[in-house]
Image (cartoon, helix red, strand yellow):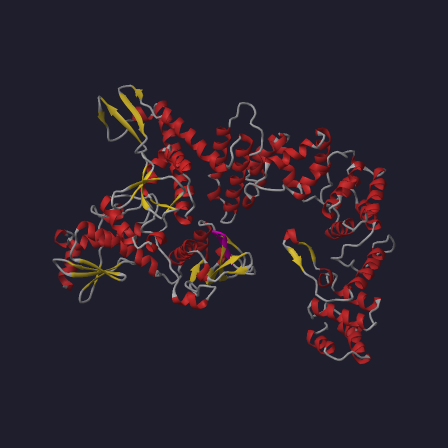
Amino acid sequence: MAILGSDLERALSLPDSPLRVNRLRRLVLDPSNAGHPAADRGTVARLVDALHRSGALDDAILDALFTEDRYLGYAFFGRDQPELGQYQPPVAGLACTEAVRDHLERRIWELTTPGPHRTRPVPGVLIPRGLRFVQRALDIWGRAGRDRPGNIGTRDLVEQLGRAVLTPPERVELAAWLTGRPLDARRVALALRLTAGDAESLLPALGVPDTVAVLRLLTDGPRRSPDPEVGAWDVTDIDAALDHCDPAQARDLFGHLRAVPTGYVRPATDDRLEVIEARLGWNVAAVRKRVKHNALNGIRALGLLPLDGGETALDRYVTLRVIGRRGPKLGPNRRFSHADAVRAALTHLAQISGYPDAGRLEWDMESRLADRSRADSGPVEIGDYRAHLDLNTDRIVVSRNGRHLRSVPNAVRADPAYHRLRETQETLRDQARRMRANLVEPLVSTGRPVEPDELRRLLTLPAGRAMLPGLIWRDIASGHLGLLDPDTLALVDLAGAARPVTGPVNAAHPWHLFHAGVLAVWQRELVARRVRQPVKQAFRELYLLTPAELTSHDHSRRFADREVDGSIAGALLSGRGWARLGPEDAYQACRPAGDLTACLDASFHGYWAMDSVLLGSAYFLAGTDRVPLSEVPPVPFSEVMRDLDLAVSVGYVDGGWWSDAGAESRAALLGALVADLGLPGVTVDGRVARIEGTRATYRVHLGSGSIHLEPGGHLCVVPAGFAGRPHDRLFLPFADDDRATSVVLSKVLLLADDKKITDRSILDQIDRMS
């Protein structure tokens, strides 16, 4: 049986004495305790330390323990690869570490010495000291077969020994020893010492002594990044390294690294190698081939390829946009890594094209696309017809003899000139979709500052001129609110006063309007002016801290214990920037929230889409520390809660979930609409609209849309018009597709004017129940 943790703890608790030592030794050496120790490695390490302090630690004890658990070394030496997420500190306060290290080095040397077959496993974890271990690693590699991968255990052993700690004289000796070795052995040694961090000393043995700067770039990565979140490179770092390197030797070095025999040690530099070669233009065909298969690093490298053969920055930009459209078709988490790769490629393209950042590149390219669209918008003559693309409405207008036609004749549709207009139309629509999703929605949800120059550039785009005046803007310095006049670049407030935009502004979040006490005023004004916002802004759901959340201090249980369909809820969260993690992770979903990280706990089996998911607490981290909810900025807090509310309302297993914030948003919209249309018989009471009609009094639930007649009775109303279009008097002051709101408010408008109802099925129900 195994060493029981309770037995070991009792023995360790005894006072230091021969009895204690004998009992500890018996626990290890008693044959009846054979097997993997049931006690955790930390407790076993304390046993070893207790014997060492008593002078009773010997090879028999260590051999027994490390034979049963060859990875027991984690307790003494920790994990040494934090860059791979494998950092684990050793047990603190051990006096026996050096004694354990000396013992393991002796055993590793003995167990790897050629001779009779040995069944005892080589202790893992420890990186030994001394040149002899590197030489032993290469001997093992050679005996296993230079061109055959060998088994996993052999590869692991070669890596463990080949990373041995060397002194400076030993590094020089290793380079001299390798000079007479076969080329593939020297390449394996280079790869081994890359992971050890001293591969520079081996460059002379490979005939590339002047490639130190490039090798450092490969091992350390760039010193700085213009966009570290997506792994973008600073091109000046690459160029500086190449300036200190002989090009022929650099090509030879890259060849050595790529030729490390398959199945053994591969350097962790392949991605960096691809990027540097792309900057030099040495791997154009390989990069483009990998991009076709959505290889993420290949996409990043594409942005660095030289613009040769007549290719312009605009051509490359359009190519990257086409690649970006593949992302939504990929898996939930993959789509975000794919989007990050495209973003990194755009950052690289901006640098090689002379732009200060990717934002300037993007909107300059979009301006060029818009200019091209204007030039290609017509008019064109097609027989007796005349066609052109209306840039204001994004529609193709066909006329004959000066009269606009309601439909496009077949003769026009078949003409190549019409096809070119359709391509231009699709280009503008694609630009508008990108602007709405990638610019306008993030502007509202994050409050990102926009400088006047950037605002002017955006207004030169047809989509920008159509969308940006529909937003409520806020002067960051003064707090002044207003709609944007695109001609004068001024903010026009509710009283009609215009203030020129002279400093940074941002799209006002509903919290800003609420905090200023003007949210309801702006909501009524947008409806009265028939301003259709490109995304939900004034009527966006707003989530404020609740008393329960203030009491809980650093976590919210607003949506805890709600069971949701994992596939539906996970897809919705992924579409809003959440990374979905596994059940064993510290948290099961997270996304950036300003300078913080929003986290969500959840319970499920396997993965999100496998089954239902039980939501838990939501909280915010600054680094690894939880942030009190009262200190979380209100805009990120509201947006995170909005994401979770959407996931619950759509994916709720029991159905019927509708939050207070959703009810308040729809009630505010109905209130503004009622005030605009002058419907005195309609009042809003919480989640219900009460309508005093001429035939009866109705109550419409603003969440479900269900209708009840007073004093009682359910009214089923499904007019044919609801299947295709909303009520003809309904105006939604936002362009978002919100069919549920449209249907509910259309029912209210229908019942407010119930004297005009002609549907016999509805009238029969009213007559029967009233």
Q: Position of residue 111 (x, y in %)?
A: 83, 57
In the image, is residue 315 part of the stretch drawn in magenta?
A: no
Q: In front here: 767 or 427?
A: 427
Q: In front here: 385 or 679?
A: 679
> Up-down: is 209 above or below 735?
above
In this view, the residue farthest toward the right is: 115
Apparent side of residue 466 relative to residue 343 in the rendered image (left or right):
left
Apparent side of residue 8 relative to residue 459 in the rendered image (left or right):
right
Q: Position of residue 490 (x, y in %)?
A: 32, 39
Apparent side of residue 163 relative to residue 581 in the rendered image (left or right):
right
Q: In front here: 229 or 768?
A: 229
Residue appearing at x 50%, y 56% in the figure = 589
Quarter the C terminus occupies: bottom left
Q: In front here: 223 or 660?
A: 223
In the image, is residue 589 part of the stretch drawn in magenta?
A: yes
Whether residue 761 is visible, yes or no, is no
Magenta highlight: main SS: strand
Q: Position of residue 578 (x, y in %)?
A: 48, 52
Residue appearing at x 38%, y 41% in the figure = 436
| Total marks in image | 0
> Up-down: is 555 above or below 252?
below
Quarter the N terminus occupies: bottom right
> Up-down: is 402 above or below 561?
above
Magenta stretch: give its range. Answer: 588-596
Apparent side of residue 760 relative to residue 645 in the rendered image (left or right):
left
